[in-house]
Amino acid sequence: MYCSPESAVALFVLGACIGSFFNVLIYRMPKGESVVSPGSRCPSCGTPIKWYHNIPVVSYLFLKGRCAYCGAKISPRYVLVEVLTAFALLALCAKFGLSKKLVWATLFLLPLIPAAFIDLDHYILPDTFTLGTLVWGVLSSFLGLSPVNPQDALIGLLLCGGFFLLVAVLSRGGMGLGDVKLAASFGANFGWKVGATALFVSVFMGASFGIALILLRKKGRKDKIPFGPFMILGAYICAFFGRELSRLYLGF
């Protein structure tokens, strides 16, 4: 769908600002800290960051990736999250336009970005994101915002979540309950067909990555690899190509 240059810039700025807040969630939520107060501080020297040193993307580039006060290097991941969120919002708008489905997709998919990074760092998927998007999937189906009706959302929730729960039990800790809740969220938002396809794509990518690391001797067979990021990448892929992939893999 066509998006004017002015609209694209506005969406990019909005997405980058959301990404800046996501950085706060990624850093503070696993520590149990408030995401509201205190304001942003330098992780190295603890100096409060002034607003003009905290402009998404721009301040990082202007300060050359260093703290304005102590000169400590700032992780490039901060700007990565901002840019990633900005482009994700642009892509969703290009896919769904200014429609009801855009509201559904934005509130479902954007919160999964901080969830992916938290899982990368701490091997956890907070309930705020997994159960939050699950509830949103069911609610949005009743409101007529999502691509599935309430019946399909509930069936998807039970089937996708139930299958991953079985896998978690059989794997004896190889899969966490956060992954199970996220799988249920996929079913609630996509319905069971596209939800199952998203999980299939996730398993394929995760297994391929794990095998590659083992062959390269970067990981052992018993080493943990966070699966959440692959699930979330699978969700994004299926938000754009889910129906085509479901026909390819499931035959309908």
Image (cartoon, rainbow, N blue to C red):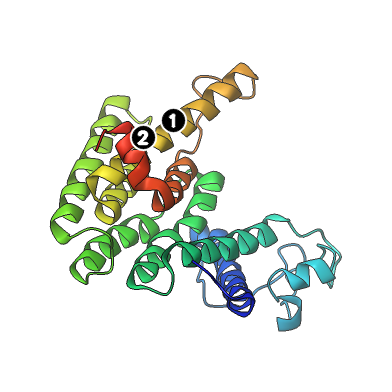
Task: Look at 58% across and 23% down and name the residue there.
Answer: 212
In the image, what residue type sits under mark 2?
Answer: Phe
Question: Vertical placement of 138 versus 202: above or below?
Answer: below
Say whether residue 25 is visible: no
Horizontal side of 246 relative to 25 (left or right) equals left
Which of the two residues, 102 or 49, is positioned nearer the viewer here?
102
Question: Which amino acid, by three-letter code, is at mark 1?
Answer: Phe
**Viewed as shown, does residue 150 lie left or right of 215?**
left
74 or 7: nearer the eye? Answer: 7
Where disc 2 sits, the SS reads helix
User: What's the residue at 47%, 41% (across, down)?
Assistant: 230
* Callout 2–callout 1 Cβ contact below 8 Å: yes
The 10 Å Cα crowd at callout 2, few under 14, some 14 to 19, many 20 or more, is some
Q: Give how far apart the Cα atoms at labels 2 and 1 are.
A: 6 Å
The residue lying at 63 percent from left, 64 percent from top is 82
Instruction: Give the left or right position of residue 210, taking residue 191 as reference.
Output: right
Question: Circle 1 is placed at which residue position?
Answer: 204
Furthest-left residue in view? Answer: 151
Q: Label 2, on which residue?
A: 200
Q: Is 224 located above or below residue 66 in the figure?
A: above
Quarter of the image where the C terminus is located: top left
> x, y percentage for residue 158?
18, 46
Q: Position of residue 154 (x, y in %)?
A: 16, 53
Residue drawn at the location 33% of the way across and 46% of the way down: 243
